[in-house]
Amino acid sequence: MSVLADQVRRLDAHLDSIIYATITSPQAHPTNEVATELNTVLHTPRVKDLLRIIKALSATTGTQAILPPSQLQVLLTQSSLLSDRSQEGLQLSQYESELEWLLVSKAAVQTYGVIVDMLLDQIVPLSDHIWYWDHVLSSPLSTTLYMIQISPARLWIWFSEVYDDSKARLRRYTSGHTVNVDSEVASTTTSTPSLAPQWRRFYAIVQSTILEKSLADVQRRMMSPIALCRAEARRKQAKLKKLREMTASGLGVLIDEGFAFSGIGADDGRSDSELSLPNSQEWKGVVERSVALMDMMLRDVLDLDLNTNQMEDKVFAAVAEDALSVQAEEDDQNRPAVVAKRLQALLDEQLPSNIMTATKLVRKNGRPSRLVRYWLPATVLLLSSTTILRIFVNRQKEILDWVQDLGSTIHDFWFNWVIEPMRKVIGTIRHDANSEIAIMSRDSLKADRESLERMVVDFAIDKSTTATGASSLSETQVADIRAKVREGDVTPILRAYEKDLRSPLLGTVRGDLVRTLLIQVQKTKVDVEVAMSGIDSLLRSQELVFGFVGLTPGIFVSVGVVRYLLGVFGGRRGYAERRKAGRCVRVLRNIDRVFSEAAPTQTNVLPYKDHGLLICEVHVLRRLAHKLLPADIEKDFLEDLNDLANLRGVQYQQRALDRIRWAYSKWLR
């Protein structure tokens, strides 16, 4: 729902309260008489038809606040107010007359909504066109690009003008009104065939036309093409700015002065039942004046020869003159029909004419069409399409192989670097034995340690004198040696090794030295396995960490690729919201600029033009903020926007703007 829809609903509800108070006024009729007469009137076919149309015209009964113009025209036709009633001589009852007034008033409110909505639709896109000309004027490169873009259109226009002028001259020559050049050509071609003189005459006419156009454009030829394009861009931009100011002024006049019932327009928190209700002639005069205001505004709002003040004065003077003529010529019962016919003329003639005129102005002074702006890249693409197609056909196999390789790479990456590490992490969490990290077998250390223990014990028993200094070993001594070997103590082997080193040759011959060396090799192997077992235990304790470390690169790459693809091809909700929030900030900047450049009137309110621009910006801001704010926050935001658009004083509106800035900065940044 827009600001305009809210205004239409308020006006519609206020009309309902006015007509209800007028019909059921206890001061005018006793209660019983009112009930009896109302019961009789409500059962007549005419009143039933009027009530049906009034219900269809009510903005509060349907989901659509503003009806389309075609439906308004149909309802006005069904009301029979457009037919000639001067010869019927029918006398309407008070209730029927009041219902007719209510019908035309609701139709006038709907027409008001259609016209204001049309002005909003016209003024909002003008900023884009003005920005385009700013971009063209921003640098010589942009101006040169614009010159290249419009060169085919200019060349076509020039050829068309030369052809039309030459055709007109040839037509005058054939009818006997020839130019001097034609007579000279005719005198020199008397002996040629019949077709040759005609072609020579036509060629001479074309040459003469081109020469005259060249002489006429001598002033333009004194300027460079880029300077001409810049001058054209400035001229069109000035026209668009003038059109925006005029449309904004007309919008402000309609919003401030249209349907200015007492109590409407100053939103002071009162309900519709508490608003002051004007008397019958007052509110009917307001409706007539508002219809005349819409009529005069549509006639003069696109007159770019006037400035905004001249247009406003002309419109108000015409409305005042129209009000005097209506009061002097029409009786009370025929006034609803006059208003209905005027509304029909507005919807049938003035509104389409205004839309057509505005469209022509924008088409003439706005940015060029897409065909003009993009003909150059489209032509390059079209000319190179055969080359591109040939490249694709010649390299079809390489392209297919590249696509297959890309698919295989993506598949292998996904399963080897994402799925498989994820399975290992899940297996680690579930204590899966197959997923445990190990750098040595489970029972290798136990077997090597038992082998070392047996080697040392057997050597100590066989060489007890050399190993321990005793002739034999008891069971207690063997158990003690066995326990020390488990702790890494191989003292008997070292003693024998030290003794054999004194005579290495003899020890080698006996074999004791080699045996002790081999036992020490086994001891070294056991020590290495013990160290490896410690490292293996450390890895097992951090197995989950290593699993996540192996999974992280694949996850990071996958998330990055997915976010990039979502940002390029779809799912750009976050980007769209950020872009929409940025546009909201620019709209707030435009609103602040409106307040900065406006010169408040004596009553401390914005002029019509500035208020119209403010309404446009508020309309755009409201549309952008929809679905950008949470539902509960949006209600407060709409209330602050209504305060911003209300004419309760410039200071009050500026405070509302400041409140919007700090209260909703979380979502509008």
Image (tube, rainbow, N blue to C red):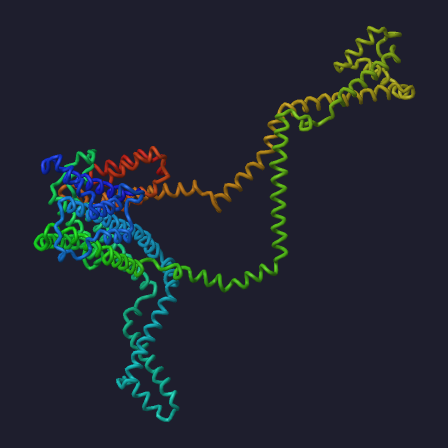
Residue nearest the observer in this picture, 260 or 140: 260
Q: Reply above or below: 87 against 198.
A: above
Position of 35 compared to 509: left or right? left
Query: In the rendered view of the protein, which quadrant contains the N terminus?
Result: top left
Res 1 visible: yes
**Residue 204 at x, y = what percent?**
34, 83
Residue nearest the observer in this picture, 224 or 591: 591
Q: Quadrant of residue 572?
A: top left
Q: Reply above or below: 57 against 171.
A: above
**Residue 162 at x, y = what percent?**
33, 75
Q: Could you tell me which residue is drawn at 58 percent across and 36 percent down?
A: 553
Q: Residue furthest bottom?
A: 191
In this figure, what is the number of numbered marks?
0
Q: Quadrant of residue 392?
A: bottom right
Q: Residue furthest left?
A: 328
Position of 346 compared to 506: left or right? left
Residue nearest the observer in this picture, 35 or 576: 35
Q: Reply above or below: 268 against 83.
A: above
Residue nearest the observer in this picture, 609 or 535: 609
**Residue 638 at x, y = what percent?**
29, 37
Q: Quadrant of residue 556?
A: top right
Query: In the rendered view of the protein, which quadrant contains the C terminus?
Result: top left
Q: Reply above or below: 65 against 496.
A: below
Q: Could you tell me which residue is drawn at 13 percent across and 40 percent down?
A: 278
